Image (tube, rainbow, N blue to C red):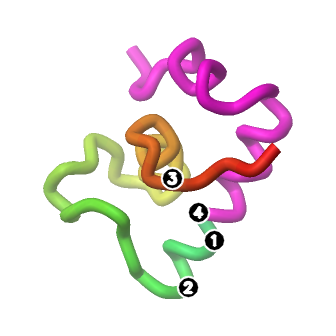
Amino acid sequence: MIYPSIDKLLTIVDSKYELVHIAAKRSRQIEETQHLQMPAGDYKSEKNIGKALEEVAEHLMIIKN
């Protein structure tokens, strides 16, 4: 099963398209700066896109509508 689930993420973000945009942008930031919002051992995903989605799921980003 994929973590975090799309159902949980869509309760935080209004649409799938916005979620993709946010996750892609944050993934690029992680790649460029190597700055993570949580300790590295707390992430379940190894890839930056998964880490970005986990940060969204944990409410570590402010999503402006």
Residue picked out by circle 1:
28
Q: Which mark is residue 32?
A: 2
The overriding secondary structure of the stretch rendered in magenta is helix
Left or right: residue 40 compared with residue 52 = left
- Which is more N-terminal, label 4 or label 2? 4
Residues in magenta, as a range: 1-26
Report the residue at 18% width, 50% height from top.
Answer: 42
Which amino acid does the dot numbered 1 rest on? Answer: Arg
Amino acid type at image mark 2: Glu
Cα distance between the residues tagged 1 and 4 = 4 Å
C-alpha separation, residue under disc 3 versus residue under disc 4: 6 Å
**Residue 5 belongs to the span the image colors magenta:** yes
Query: What's the amino acid at mark 3?
Result: Ala
Residue 52 is tagged as 3
Vertical order, 15 against 41 (above or below)? above
Mark 2 and 1 residues: CB-CB less than 8 Å, in contact? Answer: yes
Residue marked by disc 4: 27
Q: CA distance from mark 2 to mark 4?
A: 9 Å
